[in-house]
Image (cartoon, coloured by chain):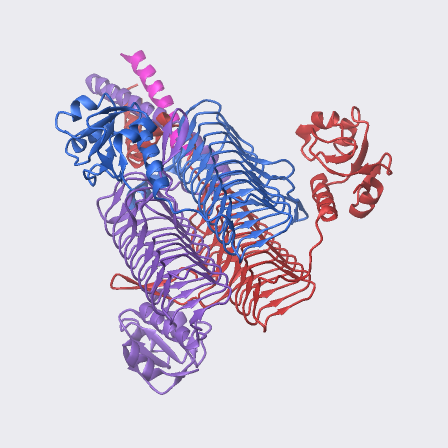
Chain colours: A blue, B red, C purple
């Protein structure tokens, strides 16, 4: 299961310095790599560690190369983006080592006769597929998953076990949905009438573009009247909640435990740190980056990094500062009053001196 | 599949102004409605938009009607609560368009012979129902759901696919539970002994009233000795965690990602914004409203709106203000000292002048 | 189903004061216990309540005993840790009342012939077990669970219904995993290349020690290259997210909705309040306690309690204080300026007087 380094570089790009004929069996971190591994340096802070790696080959930038190669005598692969090269090499080895998928429908699956499932796709045990579903080529639907009526799943999409993909929802090509995710549950929509909640039927769908990954136990609600939209290339980590009618712009990534309230429109190429929260009916521009644990309470029209979490402290110190926070408007008034008094004193003083 | 407007108004109430014989096929937003749609105006800010809607019929209040009807010439339905009217109309159209449910137990379901399941109910594929379960009339148990021993599900309750409803738990009539929800998992209860955690068996149940909706991947733990109680009319969004022994008062609603720690008692008609968090062993009065992202760290005895999240800012600004927050008790001391000095200066000054 | 108190004390330890022959049917809270129940006092604040309990037996410390026994005339069990005694007694009664488990593989389960499942274990309906799985003695795998290829589950481990335990993951003895948990989903790892995310295959595992409990809908991701590790005795509540390559030290406990970002190393005997959040690549020492709702944004090397959440207030007050928080660096500058002016005034004044 080894690969000739020269073949790998030919496939992935980069400039090879050294013997193209060495055999690589996989990827490893700088400190764990052996002569059969390829490793990478993407953070200049790790130059010293890279210099002493025992890896057979090292992927790095042409900036880092002169420094590291003073000590490191293995093969080098120069590329402007070593981390992306590493990711693609890791995909190469993962694909080479992946077990073959058996096409077909498992005997225990429950599939409606009107469903159209490409013969190259694999439907696992205990899966339920309702009427009118369309599943493209080379899809894998993991054990125990549920695909609701008229849902559409495009080619090369992978559902891990126990995914719920409800009626009429759509996902594009090369999607990955992790276990426990629920796509297309009802949005949380109610009118109030004399203290009671009147449910508003949620008749929109969830539409997901190509190359989207959705984490374990993440939930994406269907729209109320219109659709909830996840554009191409979006990456959602675990335990994320996307409410009804949201639009998540292309290539935006969200870390675990993020929540987005209803009808928020989020731009492209944004990133959200873990447990960030976005209120409803907001717009967020492209290239906005929200720090972990921050609540977005208003629209953001300018790109940039935004933050809002209370700084951690020893509990005893937090208690002291929190007590002041609760009185901050009082302190502001006292500072204003002091400024007035000091102005008066200064004026009087000047008139005396 | 169209409905005569006059019939709809007769069923739902309201005063019809215009032709009762127009045919309505459904609900649509103000800007997307056509002559076959009914739309609604509940927010006076949207009067201008309502004035130019092309909807066949417009539901609005008698306050908005004189203004809007200057331009809008379609049929009007006057009602004091247009949004609730809209919700009920949407329910009417959703029911009319719903697919018929096939009663009976799917061939792949695993049902204990002692379970009592009303013949009008529908049990989906790959469902497991344990001994002693009782399921009332016209229930739907979605594919892959699990109903534990002696659980009780009252009439007209809908479980979407892949719900877990564990032993001895109960839910009332007209309940809706979304996919991935787990009702009746063990509460998180441990004693400590010499640095180890000793599990306290959780022998209470979860008791859920009528007309409760529970969102996707929401979890509600069973009580330790007593029960966890969700009263009638409560609405829980997705990814909510309700810990053991909590009581959630009737008609309270919680948005996504809310967490409630053990033994909290929450009043009736409360609302919780997304990701709000409630500490354990607290009491919250009726009609309390907690803003998104706020942590409730003490009991609340007065109705009203409560908030506590750090304001979002550009990261560079946050870094500056957060540095001051960490030193706020120091600043308070400096302000006190300044006040003392200024008092002294003023006194001296007065004695001089 | 009753137990002689003397036998229980012989089994669990403690000093019995009174009649060892009374029959106990179970555990109850102080205020609900009857003559057939045993109850406990662990919080001295509840001494008055304990004094009037109608319980047949009361477990308490030798410190509380003299006070309480002035009024309480039932049997007493003295132990230094009444709460741990209570937990073990509750385990005793729960085990006595538990239904017998039927060993064997349910007819609807889908089990690969190469899986090694001990004959004493019970595999529920609609379970999927892939090739190479090893399951030890007296395990219970609940209905609808999925066990991926080559996973290992040690003796006496209990999976509640609908657990997902993915390929190559391992869990030790006496584990408990609650419904909806997903162990071994892909970590969230991507390189960026020209605005696109390149997936990094996640080839590590999740390794879980003995005596670990994992809550409902909690997710633990597999490592990128190395493993994610949960050490022995760790207790995780519901809806927790543990990202790839984390290490959670032995006997650490986390309440609901906690999130831990990638590669965080958390010490032993730590506790995390609900919805606490830990950023990635941090180290947290042993015996660190993080308050609910607090974000850990830097490593912590000293034991102790740490806190960081915005204090809750009435919304109107929060709006006022939050407005000041946004301007705190400005206020700090004004205080500095005031200090300078007051120093100057004082100096001038002194020179005048």
Nearer to us in this view, B115 or B174: B115
x then y, percent, for residue B3: 81, 42
B272 in relation to A47, above or below: below
Query: Does residue A341 show up magenta in the picture?
Result: yes
Q: Is residue A142 visible?
A: yes
Describe residue A49's horizontal placement relative to residue C127 as left or right.
left
Query: Does residue A249 show up magenta in the picture?
Result: no
Displayed quadrant of residue A57: top left
- Most common SS among magenta residues: helix
User: In the image as oriented, which residue stretches furthest toward the left?
Assistant: A71
Describe residue B69's horizontal placement relative to residue C188 as left or right.
right
Nearer to us in this view, C338 or C208: C208
Query: Which residues, given as a range, are shown in magenta?
Result: A329-353
Displayed quadrant of residue C209: bottom left
C176 in relation to A205, above or below: below
Displayed quadrant of residue C226: top left
x then y, percent, for residue B102: 69, 58
Nearer to us in this view, A319 or A289: A289
A308 in relation to A215, above or below: above
Q: Is residue B335 visible?
A: no
């Amino acid at each position: 299961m080894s690969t000739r380094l020269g073949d790998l570089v030919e496939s992935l790009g980069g400039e090879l310095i050294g013997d193209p004929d060495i055999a690589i069996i996989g990827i490893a971190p700088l400190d764990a790599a052996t002569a059969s591994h390829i490793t990478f340096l993407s953070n200049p802070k790790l130059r010293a560690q890279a210099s002493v790696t025992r890896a057979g080959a090292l992927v790095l930038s042409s900036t880092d190369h002169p420094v590291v190669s003073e000590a490191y005598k293995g093969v080098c692969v120069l590329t402007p983006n070593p981390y992306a090269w590493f990711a693609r090499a890791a995909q190469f080895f993962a694909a080479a080592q992946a077990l073959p998928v058996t096409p077909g429908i498992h005997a225990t699956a429950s599939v409606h006769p009107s469903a159209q499932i490409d013969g190259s796709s694999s439907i696992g045990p205990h899966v339920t597929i309702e009427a009118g579903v369309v599943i493209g080529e080379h899809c894998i639907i993991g054990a125990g998953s549920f695909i609701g009526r008229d849902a559409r799943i495009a080619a090369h999409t992978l559902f891990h076990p126990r995914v719920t993909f409800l009626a009429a929802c759509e996902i594009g090509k090369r999607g990955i949905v992790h276990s426990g995710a629920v796509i297309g549950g009802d949005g949380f929509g109610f009118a109030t009438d004399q203290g009671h909640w009147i449910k508003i039927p949620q008749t929109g769908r969830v539409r997901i573009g190509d190359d989207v990954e959705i984490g374990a136990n993440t939930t994406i609600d269907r729209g109320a009247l219109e659709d909830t939209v996840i554009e191409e290339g979006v990456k959602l980590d675990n335990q994320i909640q996307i409410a009804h009618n949201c639009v998540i712009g292309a290539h935006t990534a969200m870390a675990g435990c993020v929540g987005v309230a209803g009808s928020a429109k989020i731009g492209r190429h944004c990133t959200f740190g873990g447990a960030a929260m976005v209120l409803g009916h907001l717009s967020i521009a492209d290239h906005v980056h929200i720090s972990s644990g921050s609540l977005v309470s208003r629209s953001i029209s300018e790109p940039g990094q935004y933050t809002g979490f209370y700084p951690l402290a020893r509990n005893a110190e937090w208690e002291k500062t929190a007590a002041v926070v609760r009185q901050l408007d009082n302190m502001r008034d006292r500072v204003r009053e002091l400024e007035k008094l000091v102005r008066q004193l200064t004026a009087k003083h000047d008139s005396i001196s």
